[in-house]
Amino acid sequence: MTATDAPTETNAGPPPALHRDRRFRTFWISETISHFGDRISELALPLIAVTLLTATPVQVSVLTALIWLPNLLGLFLGAWVDQRTHKRRLLIIADLIRAAVLLSLPVAYLFDAITLTHLYLVALLTGFGAVLFAMARQAFFVGLVPRSAYVDANSKMSMSRSLSFIAGPAVGGGLVQALSAPVAIVVDAVSFLGSALLLSRIPVTEPPPPPRRTSTLGLVREGLVLVLRHPVLRAALGCTSTVNFFTFIASALLVLYASRELDLSAGAIGIALGFGAIGGFIGAALAPRVSRAIGLGRAAMIGAVLFPAPLALTALVSGPTWTKVAMLAAIELVSSVGVMLMDVNLNALLIAVTPADALGRRAGAYSAVNYGIRPLGALVGGALGTTIGLRPTLAIAGLGGVLAVLWLLASPVRHIQTLDAT
């Protein structure tokens, strides 16, 4: 990377204490609140489809696909966001969109009017809000966090996300059983309102974007060229896209598999996923230390294997209820350690090698492929689950995901020790 790509940092001292920075701390809390609410909807939405609407495996996979489909718009949204000055305002708008859309479900439930079409529309619009938030988030993040603290900041925010996976599914499962899935979604809607309120209180100076040099389509093209030609970005995209494709084959069917084939209740599923998510917290906490010990690139490669490989063992789950819950929890535990080792290090690396004025369109191009492939994985999962069965499909998903590490092995990422080396 040349000096014109992104700011460099010569200070090799310890990163600043982010938890003492009020602006970062508020941003951190706002995301933590949203994550906890999301865990409820992730369980409640497919359960509404499965229990209230008796959805088929294909219909459940379509629901998952629609949540991620708006990422294909990231190409254009990212370029558009780069030309906007007020990134914080866009984050708040994205939160409010998702809150309003989610609240429509409990309202429809009160009138006994929930349909599969309504559920699909909710998935699509919340997905759009998530994409808008993600496109503005990176530029906002760079304005809050110094470059030397990127790994530490990503670690802290990933730890919060992991904590939400620990407590969220168990709480969500309990709420779904006690209140019903549609009513439990109110909690997620309120979490977005709380996030928007906290974001509105973060003082920030947002410089105007540089004068536009080309059209929006030209900016879209720049984002694609940057991602596909930069050796680090290209390798990271190949890795994460591959692992996302295969893991979403599994994730699209996991709740259906646990509910129908393993005969687990919503509470039992929530407990298994919540306990397993302890691994995510451990992985996020360890990621900076592992990165310093063996190098950022190697830490990411270990995560790229450890994340998908255990999912193949999901196909072997059997026995009494406590055994099935314990096996699912153990699989999720190991997998969650892996995903955090991969995500924390690769996310910091992506931000570090991206020019400061291209964060939005790079994120858009990257997300369009990386997240855009998730609906395809979910649809393939639904088709395979219907034709060859759920257990063989889960085995294919886990084993296929391990191939993702080959992208990093064949790239400069394997040799990167620290962000200063980029």
Image (cartoon, rainbow, N blue to C red):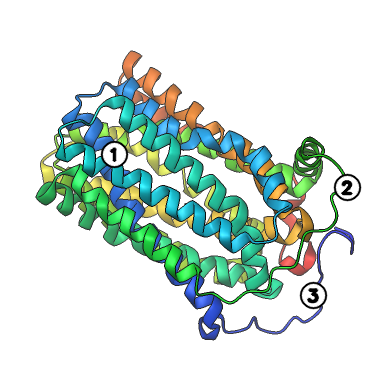
Left or right: residue 383 compared with residue 344: left
**Dot 3: what SS?**
loop
- Counting residues from the start of the chain, the first of labels 1 and 3 encountered is 3
From what the image shows, is residue 89 above or below residue 9? Answer: above
Residue beneath the point at 61% across and 42% down = 367
What whole-number distance in Å separates the C-alpha atoms at marks 1 and 3? 45 Å
The residue pinned by badge 1 equals 45
Q: Is residue 160 above or below residue 277?
A: below
Residue 9 is marked as 3
Could you classify mark 3 by the number of other residues whose Cα lies within 10 Å: few (under 14), some (14-19), or many (20 or more)?
A: few
Estimate the x, y position of residue 9 in percent, counting from the top left.
Answer: 79, 75
On residue 213, which mark appears?
A: 2
Which quarter of the figure is the N terminus placed in?
Answer: bottom right
Separation of marks 2 and 3 at Cα, in angstroms: 28 Å
Residue 284 x/y as whole percent: 48, 64
Look at discs 1 and 3 and give the one toward the viewer.
Answer: 1
